[in-house]
Image (tube, rainbow, N blue to C red):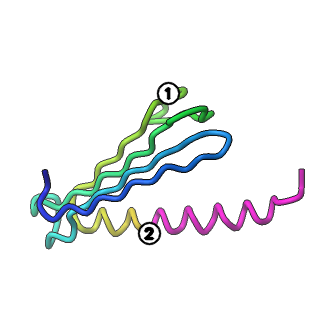
């Protein structure tokens, strides 16, 4: 187990069920060689219609996807990507609301 690990889990239920797991022990003072690790996982716990594309290879209906980042900068840039994604998706869902 990683020292100083902070772990968070959540399960969200709609027409499908998704769970997420995030843990990190960053900051550790530099790149992955300093021991900083961030793990992110999304788990299909029922009825999720999705696929994953990794380097052009499509994986239909995965049970889960996991991403691991090594280093402080990678944890920070991942945080910025998640914030951007959240903001953009909220705006688009709001814009699309009622258009169907």
**Crowding at label 1, few (<14), some or many (≥20) Cα neighbours within 10 Å?**
few
Residue 98 highlighted magenta (yes or no): yes
Q: Secondary structure at mark 1?
A: strand
Task: Report whether 38 appears left or right of 62.
Answer: left
- For image coordinates 14% across by 55% down, the residue present is 2
Is disc 1 in contact with disc 2, using a CB cutoff of under 8 Å?
no
Answer yes or no: is residue 58 visible.
no
- For image coordinates 47% across by 28% down, the residue present is 57
Task: Report whether 48 appears left or right of 53.
Answer: right
Where residue 64 appears, as percent x and y from the top left, is 43, 36
Frontmost residue, 35 versus 53 = 35
* Earlier-in-chain disc, 1 versus 2: 1
Where residue 13 appears, as percent x and y from the top left, is 59, 46
Give the residues in magenta.
80-100
Q: Which residue is mark 1?
A: 59
Frontmost residue, 18 versus 54 = 18
Where residue 95 appears, as percent x and y from the top left, is 80, 65
Where residue 96 appears, as percent x and y from the top left, is 81, 59
Residue 80: numbered disc: 2
Residue 39 vertical placement versus 31 (above, below): above
């Amino acid at each position: 187990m990683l020292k100083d690990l902070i772990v968070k889990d959540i399960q969200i239920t709609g027409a499908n069920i998704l769970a997420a797991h995030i843990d990190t022990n960053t900051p550790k003072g530099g790149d992955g060689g300093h021991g900083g690790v961030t793990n992110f996982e999304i788990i299909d716990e029922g009825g999720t219609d999705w696929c994953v594309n990794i380097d052009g290879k499509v994986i239909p209906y995965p049970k889960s996807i996991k991403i691991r980042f090594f280093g402080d900068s990678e944890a920070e840039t991942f945080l910025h990507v998640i914030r951007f994604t959240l903001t953009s998706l909220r705006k688009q869902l709001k814009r699309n609301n009622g258009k169907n």
